[in-house]
Structure formats: C-alpha cells, structure tokens
Amino acid sequence: MNTSEVRIVEVGPRDGLQNEKTLLPPDIKIALIDRLSSTGLKTIETTSFVSPRWVPQLADAAEVFHRIRKVPGVGYPVLVPNEQGYRIAREAGANEVSVFTAASEAFNRANINASIAESLQRFRPVLEEAKAEGVKVRGYVSTALGCPYQGEVPVADVVKVAKQLYEMGCYEVSVADTIGVGTPAKARAMLHAVAQEIPMHALAVHFHDTYGQALANILACLEEGVRVVDSAVSGTGGCPYAKGATGNVASEDVVYMLHGMGMQTGINLDMLVATGAWLSTQLNKPTASRVTKARTTADT
Amino acid sequence: MNTSEVRIVEVGPRDGLQNEKTLLPPDIKIALIDRLSSTGLKTIETTSFVSPRWVPQLADAAEVFHRIRKVPGVGYPVLVPNEQGYRIAREAGANEVSVFTAASEAFNRANINASIAESLQRFRPVLEEAKAEGVKVRGYVSTALGCPYQGEVPVADVVKVAKQLYEMGCYEVSVADTIGVGTPAKARAMLHAVAQEIPMHALAVHFHDTYGQALANILACLEEGVRVVDSAVSGTGGCPYAKGATGNVASEDVVYMLHGMGMQTGINLDMLVATGAWLSTQLNKPTASRVTKARTTADT
C-alpha cells in the first residue's frame, strides 16, 4: 500500500446504527449501504448477526445482507459473536466477518458475560471454519484506551489480545477506543506497542468522538504509520456504557482531513456528505459530522 | 517556557460572544470572566472596544472591563480596532490590547472596508502609544488557512502580515484559521513558514472547528513547536462569513487533550467544564465542547 493511501472502513451500518434509538426499516439500511458503496468506499461493515434481543436494530441482518447491491471490489464484513452467528452469516452469503473482544476483563464480563479467554475460545472454531472456507476475518480489540468499569487499560493487555487475534488468523486487527477517552500521545504509544507484534499493514484504528479527540488521535496514529481507519458516516452511534453517548468519528470529517493532507482514499467526499445528510434525516437527528453540518447549512 | 507547558488564551468572552445571537447582560459576562480567571487561565481576552454598531454584544465593554475582578498574574487583553478604540480601552483601564488584520485582501476589504496595508497603518499609532505607555499588544492574522471570498490564501501572504505585526511591536502573533477549513499538514506548514520570521515563542495558533479539524490542527502545531493556543470555553462563536457557523475550538477539549498528553496548562479542567456548562445554559444552547457534553450528560 502506498504510504499516502488510506483505507476507510465504514462501520456506520453496524457499529453506528446498533446504538441508535430510532429503528430504521430494512429498505433504509439497504439504501444507506448502497449509497455508501457508490462513494468509493472499499469496506463497509454491513450488519451484525447477533441475537435480536441484544441488538434490536439489526434483527434484519439476513434480509439486509441479501438485498444490498454487491459491488465488485467492495468488502461487506458482518459482525459475528460466535460459531452459530458465523454459520447464519455464511448462509446469508457473507464472505467476510468480524469478531470482537475487549482488552479489559471488566468490560468483557459486563458486555458479553465472558472472560477474554472465553471470548477468544469462542472465536477459535469461527477462525478455523473461516480459514477452511476462505472467509476473511477482521478482529476488534475494544476498550484499548480505557474502560468504563476498570478505568485504565494497560497497553500490555491490548497487545496480548491483539496478538492472539492475529495469530488465530485475523487478517486485520482494529484497536478501538470504545469510550473515546484517549488522547493522541496515548493512542500513538498504544499503536506503537501493538505494532511490535503485528505488522502495521494489518492494523486499523477505531475512535469514538466522545471527548472530541478522535481526529487528533487518528492524526497521531497516521504519523505512527497506520493506513486503515474505521469511521461511521454522519458520526452515528455511541457506546451505551459511556457518558455523553457520542458516536464514532464521522467518516466525512476523517476524509476531509485526509484529502486536505494530500492522502488518497478513493472516496468522493461530496457523495459521502450527501449520504451523511440523508442518514441524519432518516434518524431524525442532527448530523454529528462537522463537515456535513458546514456543507449543508445555508449561507448566513 | 518549558516545552511541556502550554498557555491557553481564552477568547470566549470576546471572539466567542461577539458572534453569539443571544445578548448577555454585563453581569453574566462579568461572572463568566471571573469564573474563567478562577480556573487557572492566565490570559483572558475580555471584550472588544469596537463600535456597538458592529458588535452589539460587546457594547458594554467599558462596564465589563471595569467590574471584573483583576486577578494578579492574569492578563486581560481587549480588542481595539484603531487609535480611538485604544484610547477608550485605556480609559477603561486596559493594559493589554489586541489588534487584527487578515492575510486575505478580499476578507479585510469585506470585513473592515480597508486594505491590509491600511489596516496596518491604522495600528501604527496604536503600537507607538502602547510602547510609550508600556501596554502589551497582541496581533491576530485572520484567514491564515483560507478565505470565504478568495479561497486559498498563499502562505507567503500570512508570513508577510505576521512579520509586519511583529516588527511593529506585537509581543505575540496569533495565526487564525477564521473559517476553520484548514487541515493538519497545511496548518503545520503555515506555522513553520511564519516561524522562519518570528520566534516560535512569540507565536500562537487560533482554530475554529467548522470542519472538525481544530484539535488535529492544534496537535500538528504543537508538534511543530507552538506553545500558545487560543480557544473559547464551550466552543462559542462562529464566523458570520462562513457556512455552518460553528465556533472556536472549545477550551475544555483542548485542555483535555493537553493534559492527556502530559502537558501542563495550570488549568483546573473540572472548573473549566463547570464554567462551560454554565455558559451554555446562559446562552440557551447546547455546549459545543465534547468534553463538557460527555461530563455533564447523565449516565445512560
């Protein structure tokens, strides 16, 4: 990968929407994903095959996955919690999946009622089947810069979990500041430590903007060498365990920064802004993207 | 100055409020400034001695300046547009003033109906009197990363204006992205160029968050060596000439980032957050500070 090329992993349809209170019908989600693939995005995390009891917003995972337009060259990973979820996702046609565990024991326990070791154990058959079937698996390490229950998360714990996911077969590991408390120097130091064990090209960063730090953190990580960034159009979402409830960093704001720095994403920013504005209308809430807000507000 | 020490120049009472539609009574502004000086802030731009016809919000400049508690060690600069404004400010007791001009001819013409050369000419007697009277003068160079009228602003133009202000006697020159369009690499390159002519310790950076880039730009400029940062509590303000109408970068978010990076500001963040939350109540609008939003939202 050229050093000035950055791949954006659009996580809005999954990580964004799963924490939005306004339930969207499948048609709107399908329209969202099809709009996103038209912008030039190459990876769109499409939905989650978890129990509808956990995530009512994504109860229509199979229908949505079936009906989206599959653009050649675009990846449509889906989140799976375990082997059963993996099989349902595969029946729905998914050929790329994501798995996630926390770097914080306290968070993992509270979030999915399992230890980190148990989580990883659950993924083992998923990774094995995926390998046998030629399915790509992306891994997330959540709470990589802080935990709402235990507070600080040692960098060594993040490295350990990330390394295990990579060794189990994940082609890419995304380190995630789930509650958005991180600041640039800590983000950079964490990424640097993880990159001692996993090649930088197999790493991604994932920031939430709860404390407004996301773009600065991304900048610090770009300087450290990362070239894959997760974001959500219109900045949807939020972590239900964090105060303030702000969501993922907005894709529009990330792309604006990258293009302004002369980096290439292959994304048409105008189309992305139009999609973000449209989504905020569907969710009946103001966009959290500053770029989309600036571009869609009438001259005063 | 120790390299890990950063001075925040709080511009909320002037640059922030002057673009807020809700007119605040003098008592509230005085309470705001007194709260700000209690947080540990060392520089608070207090008001502006311009014509009330231009800035109705600050028509009470003399009263506000008179009645604020003057904390020893805290600077209270006030903006002055010309020699007449300087004299009124001095009569009100000001012993530090600010002057500003744009780096863009088109903006200066539209904003104050004068060429840049004419603006600088107006400041010459101000700088001379200030020198004779031992009054410190701070200079702003606005539209340093873009102009709503002419678009791109050549870095050479920013350097030229900044250098003139410095040579005329400004002890500090703040380069300002008035419309918030800049991105980190451009911000850094601009600062680097200006620092070829003015010592870095005499430079400050001033970002608006219209496109969400402010903190990332500040990070890039800190890496380049700047140690003075302008910001406004609760992210008030906005440029009436820019779409989107978002304001200055929020002081709370800047301080959160700096402290998270192990830098010292001397500011009590909790008190700053409380002041930002209080101000947003007075202005009857949600805070634009992500930190204040996160810290003051109830657990969900």
Image (tube, coloured by chain):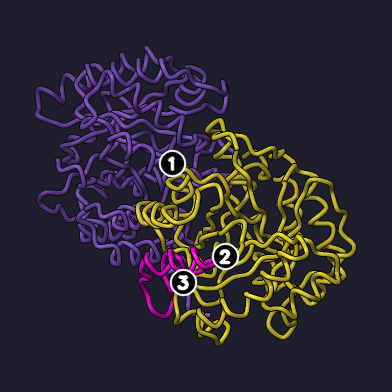
Chain colours: A yellow, B purple
Q: Position of residue B38 (x, y in %)?
A: 21, 61
- Which three-letter amino acid code belongs to the residue tagged 2? Tyr
**What numbered label is drawn on residue A140?**
2
Q: Position of residue A246 (x, y in %)?
A: 54, 65
- Tell which of B164 and A273 is nearer to you: A273
Mark 1 highlights which residue? A223
Q: Residues within 10 Å of mark 3 (few under 14, many from 20)?
A: many
Magenta stretch in the rendered image:
A140-165
Evaluate whether label 1 is on the same chain as label 2.
yes
Q: Quadrant of residue B160?
A: top left
> Mark 1 near mark 3, Cβ–Cβ under 8 Å?
no
Q: Chain of mark 1?
A: A
Image quarter where the N terminus of chain B lies is top left
How many numbered circles does the render carry?
3
- Which three-letter amino acid code belongs to the residue tagged 3? Ala
**What numbered label is drawn on residue A103?**
3
- Residue A172 is left or right of residue A39, and the answer is left
The residues tagged by marks 1 and 3 sit, at their Cα atoms, a distance apart of 24 Å
